[in-house]
Amino acid sequence: MVDIFFVISGLTILLIAGEATLRGAIDLARSLNVSPAVIGLTVVGFGTSLPELVVCIEAAIVGKPDFAVGNVIGSNISNTLLILGVGAMIRPLACDPRAVHRDGTMMLVAIAIIFILGVTGEIVAWQGLLLLLALAGFMGWSFFMDRRHHGPAAELHEREAENIPAAPASGARTLFYVIAGLAGLTGGANLLVDGAEGIARSAGVPDYIIGLTILAIGTSLPELFASISAALRGHSDLAVANVLGSNMFNVLGILGATSLVTTLPFAPEIQTIDLWVMAGSSVVLIPILITGWRIARSEGALLLAGYAGYIASIAYRL
């Protein structure tokens, strides 16, 4: 019971602290006259993945790399199948073709890189550094293209920034939001990892399974809430953009940063099952997006059915 309490408390703190950090960071960026497109691409894009990042770093520090790998792989699977599925069931998710071409292509490239590294067995520090450089390269290229051609992708990132309410317009309050949010993220991650470790130990469940399920679903809640909010407000293209950006940042940014703390081994089961599910769901998503440039409710139902089947496969492994 104590471990379950730690997990629930950790997730709750992560959600609240992540939102506070995101709003404070957006307000800080606005006060520095950072363009809305840049805020949407960086602050909002990274902000929704903060729980995954902090949890993975914490897991690496305490010697639980399987938590980190499972968290990222499981988060990407839940983003693609669960979050887009839920969003499409609420309201069909429209998407902009040119924005999908850019962000969707980069997501597939990132997934392919991690797939290749994963099947080789592990990600070491120098490979993680290359992942971070690849992410930085994409960000730099995106800035250049958005400034040169103010196209759909730039407009989409601007609306991502505008869709998040800012913290109160006060320098002291903004700083408080950011500092308190970061402290909360650290404390919440500590509780969550401690609770997950206790559950794994008492139930005899492998660490990677905990990462694929409890940690992955829990740390994906910000993306889920953001996508539901976007769908309800009629900004369904933001839901798709959130998932594409989050999936790319998860594999390049989070695995890259975490591998600088410790080597990230891929469990044999992740190599033979979960990496393939992540890659397969990402590849299948693109044809769904480009046929009509929307995810219909029927397609959302198929995505949810796919996620239910995936969870059933995890249960079968226990």
Image (cartoon, rainbow, N blue to C red):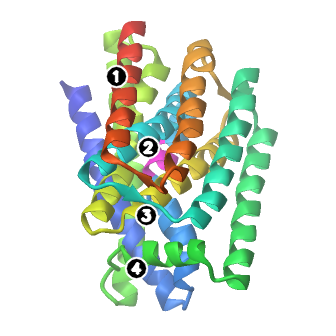
Residue occupying the point 58% across, 59% down? 100
Camera-near label (3 vs 4) is 3
Marker disc for residue 235: none
Please tell me which of labels 3 and 4 falls first in the chain: 4
Q: Are marks 1 and 3 in contact (CB under 8 Å)?
A: no
- Judging from the image, what secondary structure is the residue with disc 1 in? helix
Amino acid on which the number 3 mark rests in the picture: Asp
Q: What span is in magenta? A: 51-55
Q: Are marks 3 and 4 in contact (CB under 8 Å)?
A: no
Name the disc covering residue 198, or none: 1
Q: Which mark is residue 79?
A: 2
- Which quadrant would residue 182 be assigned to in this image? bottom left
* Crowd band around label 3 with a 10 angstrom C-alpha radius: few (<14), some (14–19), many (20+): many
Which mark, by number, is residue 162?
4
- Secondary structure type for disc 4: helix
| Image spot of residue 129 (x, y percent) | 77, 48
Between label 3 and label 2, give the one nearer the viewer.
Answer: 3
Total numbered labels: 4
- On the image, numbered disc 3 is attached to which residue? 237
Measured as percent of width and height from the top left, residue 159 is found at 44, 76
Residue shown at 60%/24% (left/top)? 276
Q: Nearer the viewer, residue 257 or 284?
A: 284
User: How far separated are the C-alphas under marks 4 and 2?
Assistant: 22 Å
Check if mark 3's residue and mark 2's residue have beta carbons within 8 Å.
no
Q: Amino acid at mark 1?
A: Gly
Q: Residues within 10 Å of mark 1 (few under 14, many from 20)?
A: some
Query: Quadrant where the C terminus lies?
Result: top left
Q: CA distance from mark 3 to mark 2?
A: 15 Å
Q: Position of residue 61 (x, y in %)?
A: 56, 37
Ranked by sequence position, the earlier of labels 4 and 1 is: 4
**Who is closer to the viewer here, 44 or 234?**
234
